[in-house]
Image (cartoon, grey):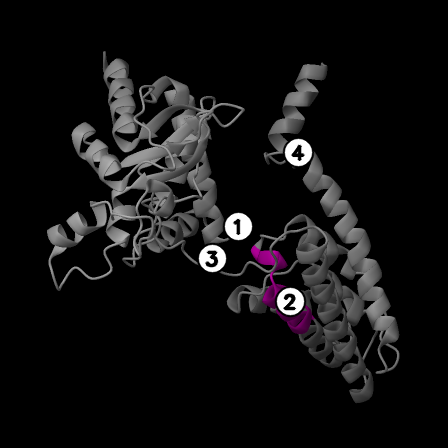
Amino acid sequence: MFATVKEFALRHLVADTPPMAPIERRKTAVGAMLGVILAGGMLALLPAGDIWLVAVLGATAIIVFALPHSPLAQPWSVLGGYLVAAVASLVAASLVPSFLLAAGLALGATVWCMTRFKCMHPPGGALVLVVVGEGVPTLGHAGHILLVALGNALAILLAALLINNYVLRRSYPQCRTTPVPGPHRGGDPAPSERSGLSHDDIEHAVQSLGSFVDVQEGELVRIFNAAVGHAFERHMATRCGDVMTRNVITVAFGTDLEEAWNLLRRHQVKALPVVDSFRRVVGIVTVADFLRQLDDTGAAGLAVRLQGLLRRTPGSASEKAEVVGQIMTTSVYTATEDMAVAELVHRLADAGFHHVPIVDERRKLVGMVTQSDLIAALHRRVALAAA
C-alpha cells in the first residue's frame, strides 16, 4: 500500500527536480529573510509618502534568492512583471465592474504581456488580484498604486543585488552569459564552451517542448557540459596517477639556460619542472619561456638571438638571464594523483596548458601529465570498450 502511494506521488505529485545542496538551502533561507527585511526598511524610509510592503513581495523574494539564475528572477522580469500586472489591473478595474471578470481579463492581459516582452514573473499574477481587489481606481489612486508596485519591485531588486553578491557570494543578476575566451586569444571561445550546442539548437528544442523553460540558455549549456564531464569521468574512471609519466626530467633554479635547452631538445619535451633540493615544484620552464626572452628576432635572426641567450656571460655581472630561475614561470598549476582525468581535461582545455606537474601532499613532484598522455589514455579506453 505504502509503495503504491509513494509511486503515485512520485509520478503525479512531486516534481522531478534535483535536490538543492544543504548550503544552498541555508543561503536561500537567509537571503529571503534579509531581503524582505531590507526591502521593507528601504520602503519605510522613503520620503515619497505611504508606500507599503505588498504581500506578493514574499513570492518575489523566494524567486530571486532561491532561483537567482532563473529567467524569472532577473531585473527586467521582476520590474516588467510588476509594471504590466499593475497597469493591466488598473485598466480592467476601471472598465469592468465585476471583480471576477476584471481579474480574469487583467490576468490574461498580464500573462500575454509577460510572454511577449520577456518579463515572466509569477508574483505579478498575485499582484493582479491585489490591485483589482482595491476597486475602481481614481486617477490619483491609480498613480499611487503604480508607485507602490514600482517601489516594491525596485526595493526587492536592490536587496537581491546587495545580499546575493555581498552576503551570499552569488553572482546576480545573470541575464546573459559571456562566452569564456579561448587561451590563444584568437577569437574562439574556450574549448569547454564549444559544446556543439548552438543558439538555434536550443531554441528549436525549447519550441518543440511547447512550454516555458525556466532556465537560461547559458545555464542550460553549463548543465550540459557538466553532465558530459560527469559521464566522461564515469566512463573513464581514471585518475591522473594512472596516466602520468613518472620518470620526469627536471631542472633546478640555478641550472644554466643552455643545459635546460639541451634537455628539452634531447628528450623532445616542451616543459621542464623546476624543483628544489627536496624535489618540491617551484616553477616550470617551457620553450615559450625561452622565446619570450628574445625580444627582437628581426635584426639578427631567431637562431643567432637564441645562441646569444644560451651562451654563458663571462664574469660576475650580466644584463641577460643566465639560469632557469630567471626565466621560469613561478605560478604553476599542479594536480594530484587522485584528481580525475575528466576534471584535468576540463582545466587543461580552458587554461591552454599542455603539461601539468603531478605532486603529492607535500608538493613533491611525482609525475607529469601531458596532452599526449591524455590522448593515449583515451585511446586505450576506447579500444577496451570496443574489444
Residue 155 in picture, x, y percent from top left: 75, 68
Outermost residue toward the bottom in this view: 139
The amino acid beneath tag 2 is Gly
| Badge 1 or badge 3: first in the primary sequence | 3
Instruction: Pick whichever of labels 1 and 4 is earlier in the sequence.
Output: 4
Question: Residue 132: x and y, percent?
Answer: 78, 71
Q: Give the position of the C terminus as an image quadrant.
A: top left
The tally of labels here is: 4
Viewer-nearest of labels 1 and 4? 1
Task: Using residue 219 as the reference point, say whether residue 352 is left or right of it.
Answer: left
Dot 2 crowding, Cα within 10 Å, few <14, some 14–19, many 20+: many
Give left or right: position of 158 versus 193: right
Q: Of marks 4 and 3, which one's residue comes earlier in the chain? A: 4
Q: Which residues are magenta?
A: 71-85
Mark 2 vs mark 4, CA separation in Å: 28 Å
Label 4 sits on residue: 13
Q: Residue at x 81, y 59 (%)?
A: 36
Describe the element under mark 3 as helix, strand or loop: loop
Q: Nearer the viewer, mark 2 or mark 4?
A: 2
Which residue is disc 3 drawn over?
177
Residue situated furthest front in the rendering: 315
The residue under label 1 is which amino acid type? Val
Amino acid carrying label 3: it is Thr
Please give the name of the residue rendered at 22% of the width and 34% of the height, measured from the top-left corner: 264
Nearest to viewer (mark 3 / mark 2): 3
- Image height check: is 91 above or below 373? below
